[in-house]
Image (cartoon, rainbow, N blue to C red):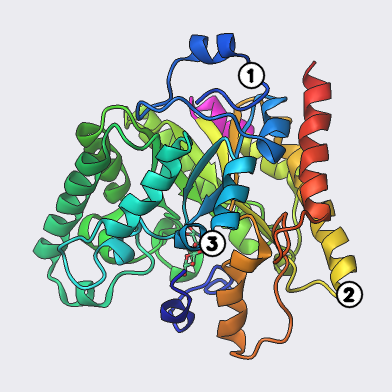
Amino acid sequence: MRLGGTIGRRRLLAAGGAAFAAGAAGLSTADAARDGPAPGGAVAAAGGGLARAAARCGVLFGSAFDTEALDHPAYGELIRQNSAHTGNLNSFKYDWLRSKGPSADFAGAERLLAFATERGLPFTAAVLVWNDYPPAWLKSKSLAELRYLFDAHIDETMQRFAGRVAAWVVVNEPFAPWDREPGGWRTGPWYTAFGPDYVARAFRRARAADGRARLILNEAFCERRDLVGAAVRPALLALVERIKHAGVPLDTVGLQGHLQLQHGGFDHADYADLMRRLAAEGVDIEITELDVDDSAMKGTADRRDAEVARHYEEFLAAVLQVPQLRGVTTWGLSDRFTWYHEVAAKESPLYPRKPRPLPFDEALRPKPAYFAIERAFLAAARRRR
Ligand code: XIL
């Protein structure tokens, strides 16, 4: 991971408002044949571990990864064993593809995609358009240049990976109430270029360049019981209603699911209700970036592990009640490779306590969170029978 290069960067999730196939193991060959090959031509591999448990209730489980899995074969193997699909953490983002200027370096993204494809894992690329993390060189561009760069990025990137990735997060995090823009929109270069219309434009252009990839609109914060959550939930629902009624090619709404206790806790019933309302607009739902931040938890590692596990189980119990939930993806799989190292290091370079937000520990051993996630999937499978 490009840890060093990101520590000093502007935004981490907590900042600002005060702060994503068939064929997971458990499905028969007949099931897989009926559902057909995954987009991208690859037939989904049989996942084990958490993916097998999730398949029992018809949900695709996976973990996002990046170059750390290429550098640590045991970690790559753990991802494969537990995933029925996967995707990137960073390497398909604009500021990673085009860090030095408009011309893209796709080498890192291609390496990740090759890893997934060789293992038969359908791949979700993330993200195509995000107003956060603009590369420094973009900041001096004129309005006309921004508009040109937006279209050119979508056309080149989508055409390059067409037929090879199963899905794209086309727009990430459209709302950021603390930017104080009418409607709660997140400001940034693409918002500057087109206003709120950038969302519909991105989806239409993405579909024109790749007619098969599932197109995802991804948002954060919706699980939060604070003012940010209260502002983002209706804004997201209104956006989805508007663009679906306008015929914009949106297939899936992704809800990130970075569970962070420090923002007033969660209302899982409200959250499941939002999922049902979104699904009523004719979209699938995915949990795209699940993890449980333990930074606000007190006590020993064992105690925090138990609390993290409980939050995974309660959250999954609620969201697995929504039939349109098709996938759950965790933002990494082992505590060794979580983005919360970056978050903690930003607070204090010598951060004293290692974050423990994921199902496996630093030594790749399953934690209580692993068993809690497995229990939640198996309980949902029993309910659905
Ligand atoms: C994070 C990555 O995990 C970090 O390595 C990177 O420095 C910043 O982005 N919401 C998102 C993800 O949509 O793209 C973010 O990923 C985490 C929060």
Circles 2 and 1, Cβ within 8 Å, touching? The answer is no
Name the residue located 16 percent from the left edge and 62 percent from the top edge: 146
Magenta stretch in the rendered image: 276-283
Instruction: Using a 10 Å C-alpha cutoff, classify the residue at mark 1 as few (fewer than 14 neighbours), some (14 to 19) or many (20 or more).
Output: some
First along the sequence among labels 1 and 3: 1
Return the residue nearer the eye: 263 or 56: 56
| Left or right of residue 255: residue 315 | right
Closest to the camera, between mark 2 and mark 1, is 1
Which quarter of the rendered picture does the C terminus lie within?
top right
Instruction: Using a 10 Å C-alpha cutoff, classify the residue at mark 3 as few (fewer than 14 neighbours), some (14 to 19) or many (20 or more).
Output: few
The amino acid pointed to by label 1 is: Leu
Q: Relative to residue 199, is residue 340 depicted above or below?
A: below
* Mark 2–mark 1 distance (CA, rounded to whole Å): 40 Å
Name the residue located 63 percent from the left edge and 62 percent from the top edge: 227
Closest to the camera, between mark 1 and mark 3, is 3
Circles 3 and 2, Cβ within 8 Å, touching? The answer is no
Instruction: Using a 10 Å C-alpha cutoff, classify the residue at mark 2 as few (fewer than 14 neighbours), some (14 to 19) or many (20 or more).
Output: few
Measured from the top left, where is residue 364 in percent x and y?
70, 59
Q: Relative to residue 183, is residue 10 depicted above or below?
A: below
Circles 1 and 3, Cβ within 8 Å, touching? The answer is no
Q: Which dot marks residue 300? A: 2
Q: Say whether residue 129 is visible.
A: no
The amino acid pointed to by label 3 is: His
* Residue where numbered disc 1 is placed: 27
| Left or right of residue 372: residue 200 | left
Return the residue nearer the eye: 40 or 319: 40
Task: Tell me which secondary structure the magenta stretch mostly adopts.
Answer: helix
Ligand 1 within 8 Å of the CB at mark 2: no
* Residue where numbered disc 3 is placed: 72
Return the residue nearer the eye: 229 or 359: 359
- SS of the residue at dot 1? loop
* Mark 1–mark 3 distance (CA, rounded to whole Å): 30 Å
